[in-house]
Amino acid sequence: MSETAADTLIDVLENIGVKQIFQLIGLRFQHLMIYSPSRAAKGRKQSMRVNLSALITKIAVMLLFLEVAFVPGGAIAEQSSDMEKVKAASKAFFAALNARDPGAMAKVYAHTPYVVHIDPSFNEGIRLGWEAVNKSWENLRNETTQIDVSFSETGEPQIVGNLAWEVGTEKGVVIAADGKHIPIEAFVTNIYQNIDGRWLLVSHQAAEPPKYGVSTQR
């Protein structure tokens, strides 16, 4: 490659910010080149003689870095971040449940007309819409003195687009306002929606487990 062609290549690489990318992966752009003496003597961009072997090798490293970090890596990082946020939302839900705190529960739910709460254990039936769902949690607080429920998930939460869901079993004891101890064991499905970057609960459904238990086989 001629010096003129090399100069053109250098100009292109500089213009697209390759120096900054090299810095991210611990390389120094100037290590790729041998500067001509005229560069220091003249106040204009000088021609540079490029070590082609080193340049090609390090560009290949740079492209590999771009492929790993910005294409699949970025997607994996984003997926991992969403997974952590969904798990955090799940923990917040059960923390609010055990605290019998409608205010904390309000921060977990999406306040939309389509949110739903299905829990036959407390004769609430199907509550649709945020006002009805919020009322059901207020009723639960008034009708109980203590809730101690734990959640055991079956597998990892699943995320598809802006929706995520988890399934599992909740077990524990609820003490009613009249002092009655109510054992709790239910299959649970929670569905979350990503709204403005926040994973919020849009559906909580609890149901009595069937006698045959859980199976992953068909």
Image (cartoon, rainbow, N blue to C red):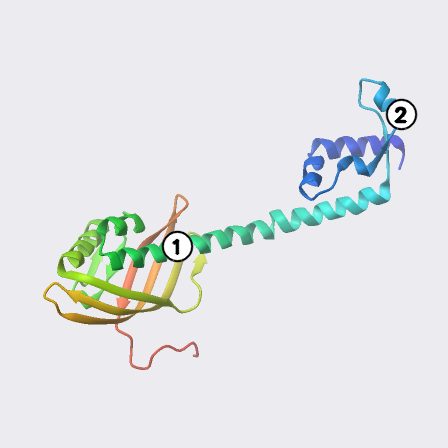
- Numbered disc 2: secondary structure: loop
Give the camera-side residue of 81 and 117.
81
Give the left or right position of residue 68, taking residue 54 as reference.
left
Mark 1 vs mark 2, CA separation in Å: 60 Å
Residue at image coords 27%, 50%: 104
Which picture quadrant has residue 188?
bottom left
Residue at image coords 26%, 73%: 208
Residue identifier under label 1: 88
Q: Residue most toward the left?
A: 178
Mark 2 neighbour class, 10 Å CA radius: few under 14, some 14 to 19, many 20 or more = few
Amino acid type shown at disc 1? Ala
Quadrant the C terminus occupies: bottom left
Question: Which mark is drawn over residue 37?
Answer: 2
- Numbered disc 1: secondary structure: helix
Q: Is residue 110 visible?
A: no
**Location of residue 33 in the rendering, given as x and y in whole percent from the top left corner:** 83, 35
Give the left or right position of residue 202, taking residue 86 as reference.
left
Quadrant the N terminus occupies: top right
